Image (tube, helix red, strand yellow):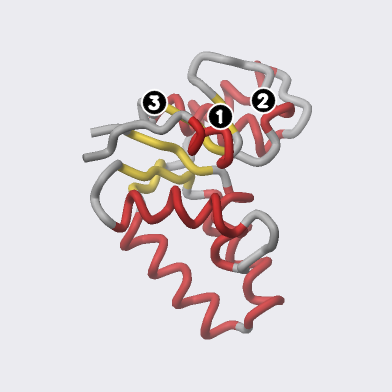
Amino acid sequence: MMKIFIDTNVLLDVLAERRPFYDASAEIISLFEKDQAEGFISAMSFNNTHYILRKRIGKNRAIKAMRTLLDTFHVVSLDEKILNRTIDADFGDFEDGIQFFSAIRSSADYLITRNVKDFPHRDIPILAPEEFLKLKLDFS
């Protein structure tokens, strides 16, 4: 089964219903809900997602969203090895480095993000949600 790592910005597109990004991101998330692919996120995504959602939709709904993430995704633990690799790689954005090395740790086939340009490393395909959907991969 295909493994897809999802960056925090794509999660927020769906959970905060951010337009015009919602539709493509939601279509990808639905693959995991239908067990057509395996979804992975970094443990760090919980902190960032909850922080933003709590302000936008309130504490109770934000906590429910965290439960949905746990039920939908495999969580890649953030550890010293990922942090060291991020520091050594000199990413322009530290969080992007953590996301990238978490995706590598998960053995993901793709990393899906809306800020593709911020990921200079290409050890795995890094695509925007719309680009991924244009691949028309067979998930049956």
Which disc, if any, is residue 62?
Answer: none
Element type at marker 3?
A: loop
Q: Earlier in the sequence, mark 1 or mark 2?
A: 1
Element type at marker 2?
A: loop
**Distance from Cα at disc 1 to Cα at disc 2:** 8 Å
Q: Residue at x 54, y 76 (%)?
A: 62
> Which residue is situated farthest in the right direction here?
92
Residue closest to the eye, 73 or 23: 23
Q: Contact, CB < 8 Å: mark 1 with mark 2?
A: yes
Name the residue type under label 2.
Phe
Between label 1 and label 2, give the one nearer the viewer. Answer: 2
Disc 2 crowd rating (10 Å Cα; few below 14, some 14-19, many 20+) is some
Q: Earlier in the sequence, mark 3 or mark 1?
A: 1
**Distance from Cα at disc 2 to Cα at disc 3:** 15 Å
Disc 3 crowd rating (10 Å Cα; few below 14, some 14-19, many 20+) is some
Which image quarter: residue 36?
top left
Q: Residue at x 67, y 25 (%)?
A: 119
Pointer 3: what residue?
109
Pointer 2: what residue?
119
Q: Residue at x 45, y 45 (%)?
A: 41
Pointer 1: what residue?
100
The answer to whether 138 appears left or right of 84 in the picture is left
> The N terminus lies in which quarter of the figure?
top left
Q: Earlier in the sequence, mark 2 or mark 3?
A: 3
